[in-house]
Image: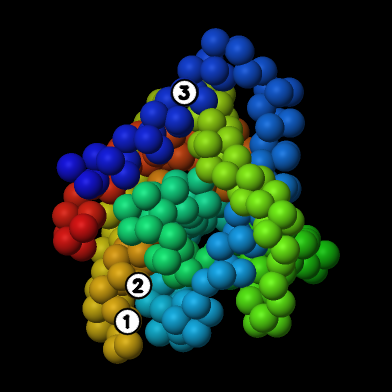
């Protein structure tokens, strides 16, 4: 029952966004505008507010980061090695298998399932998530195609509004400054718009992709929804110092579907077909696999 209560609202909004995009009630231009304000204002404000009142000492544990990012690295390398062997060139397939949709699916899932206090573990992962994986892929793609690594593109990852929101929230937390209630109410209102808008944007973006799963897409979906969370479950169980809540958050983040922004790294039609199919398929099937991982973690 608890799993259904956490999952249903999330996927209901994704389906709503899909229907709005499919029926063209939310056009591509309108969806782009909604996405801009969501990811440049609403979501950074939500992350700012969350980490500003979080327990940083509990969230920024080296064991927490290692338990998540060691499996990230292993999945990224294994999938890319296999894909490179089959294709003979660099591709974003390893990124598809290792990059979770932790913002659009992870935050609302953890907030509704475990409460706001557990979000401190999500924020700790998010600080390094895009920067680490996008930089890894940029190095791999440049080396795999014998191109130069674009240092400026890597630095742009640091200018991500959501990372800025997290860092500003952490600075406020450390400083001990008190924000006036009237101003904090504005921050709260903006943050409350983030999750519903983000999920509708996700659904609308998925409506532009055709679900034509190939063997490759099925393999990527298995790696994302089964192999990756299983590795995190194992690593978080072996490393000392992680409580049950932290371990549950890490496993559920790993079990989230692939992030839509991986599409930005597609270079050809083959990449577009495989990545879009894997994103759509993993999002669809995660409605079934996430409750299974909740059962494994006892929530």
Q: CA distance from mark 1 to mark 2?
A: 6 Å
**Residue 32 tag number:** none
The reply to whether callout 1 and callout 2 are in contact (CB within 8 Å) is: yes
Residue situated in front as seen by the camera: 139 or 65: 65
Residue 266 position in % (x across, y down): 62, 43
Residue furthest out toward the right: 152
Q: Residue 132 vs residue 210: left or right?
A: right
- Residue at image position (44%, 48%) is 108
Q: State the image coordinates of residue 261 (x, y, percent, origin top left).
A: 60, 45
Separation of marks 3 and 2 at Cα, in angstroms = 31 Å
Is residue 136 at least partly visible in the picture?
Answer: no
Question: Residue 36: in sight, yes or no?
Answer: yes
| Element class at badge 3 | helix
Question: Pointers 3 and 1 in contact (CB under 8 A)?
Answer: no
Q: Position of residue 4 (x, y in %)?
A: 24, 40
Relative to 196, residue 149 above or below: below
173 relative to 248 in the view: left or right: right
Image side of residue 158 versus residue 84, left or right: right
Q: Which residue position is annotated with label 1? A: 242
Report crowding for label 1: few under 14, some 14 to 19, many 20 or more residues within 10 A (C-alpha).
Answer: some
Q: CA distance from mark 3 to mark 1?
A: 37 Å
Label 2 secondary element: helix
> Along the polypeptide, which appears first: circle 3 or circle 2?
3
Mark 3, residue position? 16
Residue toward you, 128 or 45 = 45
Q: Tell me if mark 2 has few (under 14), some (14-19) or many (20+) residues whose alpha carbon lies within 10 angstroms of its own.
A: some
Q: Quadrant of residue 250?
A: bottom left
| Residue sitting at x 66%, y 52% | 185
Q: Considering the numbered disc 1 on the image, is that residue within a helix, a strand or a loop?
A: loop
Disc sitting over residue 246 in the figure: 2
Location of residue 168 by image quarter: bottom right
């Amino acid at each position: 029952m608890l799993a259904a209560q956490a999952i249903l609202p999330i996927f209901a909004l994704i389906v709503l966004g899909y229907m709005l995009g499919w029926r063209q009630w939310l056009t591509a231009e309108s969806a782009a505008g909604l996405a801009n304000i969501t990811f440049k204002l609403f979501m950074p404000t939500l992350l700012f507010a969350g980490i500003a009142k979080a327990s940083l000492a509990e969230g920024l544990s080296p064991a927490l980061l290692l338990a998540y990012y060691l499996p990230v690295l292993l999945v990224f390398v294994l999938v890319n090695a296999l894909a490179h062997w089959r294709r003979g060139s660099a591709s974003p397939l390893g990124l598809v298998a290792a990059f979770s949709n932790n913002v659009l699916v992870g935050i609302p899932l953890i907030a509704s399932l475990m409460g706001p206090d557990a979000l401190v573990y999500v924020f700790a992962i998010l600080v390094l998530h895009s920067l680490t994986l996008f930089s890894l892929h940029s190095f791999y793609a440049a080396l795999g195609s014998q191109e130069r690594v674009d240092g400026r593109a890597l630095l742009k990852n640091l200018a991500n509004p959501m990372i800025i929101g997290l860092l500003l929230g952490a600075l406020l937390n450390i400083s001990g400054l008190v924000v006036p209630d009237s101003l904090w109410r504005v921050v709260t209102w903006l943050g409350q718009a983030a999750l519903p808008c983000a999920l509708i944007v996700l659904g609308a973006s998925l409506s532009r992709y055709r679900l034509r799963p190939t063997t490759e897409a099925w393999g990527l979906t298995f790696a994302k929804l089964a192999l990756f969370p299983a590795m995190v479950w194992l690593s978080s169980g072996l490393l000392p110092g992680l409580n049950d809540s932290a371990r549950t958050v890490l496993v559920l983040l790993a079990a989230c579907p692939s992030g839509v922004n991986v599409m930005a790294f597609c270079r050809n039609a083959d990449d577009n077909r495989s990545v879009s199919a894997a994103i759509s398929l993993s999002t669809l099937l995660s409605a079934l696999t996430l409750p299974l991982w909740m059962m494994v973690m006892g929530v």
